[in-house]
Image (spheres, helix red, strand yellow):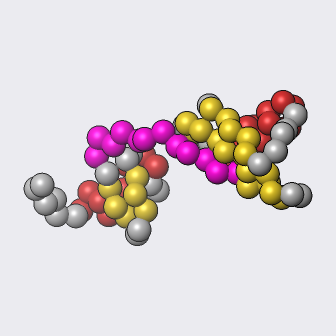
Amino acid sequence: MKVNVIGGEMDVREIDEYMKYVGKKYAGRQIKQLDIVIDGDFIDLKCHFMDTDFQRAYRSADYLVNDMDKLNDAKQSEFAEKERHKI
């Protein structure tokens, strides 16, 4: 993960803690770059993520998933009963 500190300087240990924080917050997503923006007493974290390669996308109740296993049993059976449309 590339890290940019903008607007000041930061100790390496503090940078490591922010990296751990965003790693836990966005578990399961690959972070390409982290911008740590220092504005006086405030810190703004901006994460840039790797592109996700979708084989197939499913839309369910406004959620977009690339794997049906992420949906509960009721949603999986709802998809099984839907009419398929050719692309």
Q: Going 16% across and 63% down the picture, which residue do you hit?
A: 83
* Residue at the bottom extreme of this rendering: 61
Q: Eyeballing the image, is 30 above or below 77? A: above
Q: Position of residue 1 (x, y in %)?
A: 62, 31
Highlighted magenta segment, given as a residue range = 45-56
Could you say which is closer to the camera, residue 63 or residue 7? 7
Q: Position of residue 5 (x, y in %)?
A: 73, 41
Q: Going 65% across and 41% down the picture, which residue do you hit?
A: 34
Left or right position of 53 against 8: left
Q: Going 37% across and 47% down the picture, which residue do you hit?
A: 66
Q: Going 52% across and 43% down the picture, which residue do you hit?
A: 49
To which quarter of the image does residue 73 belong?
bottom left
Left or right position of 60 against 1: left
Left or right position of 81 against 34: left
Q: Position of residue 3 (x, y in %)?
A: 67, 35
To which quarter of the image does residue 84 belong?
bottom left
Query: Does the magenta run of residues contain 49?
Result: yes
Q: Position of residue 48 (x, y in %)?
A: 55, 45
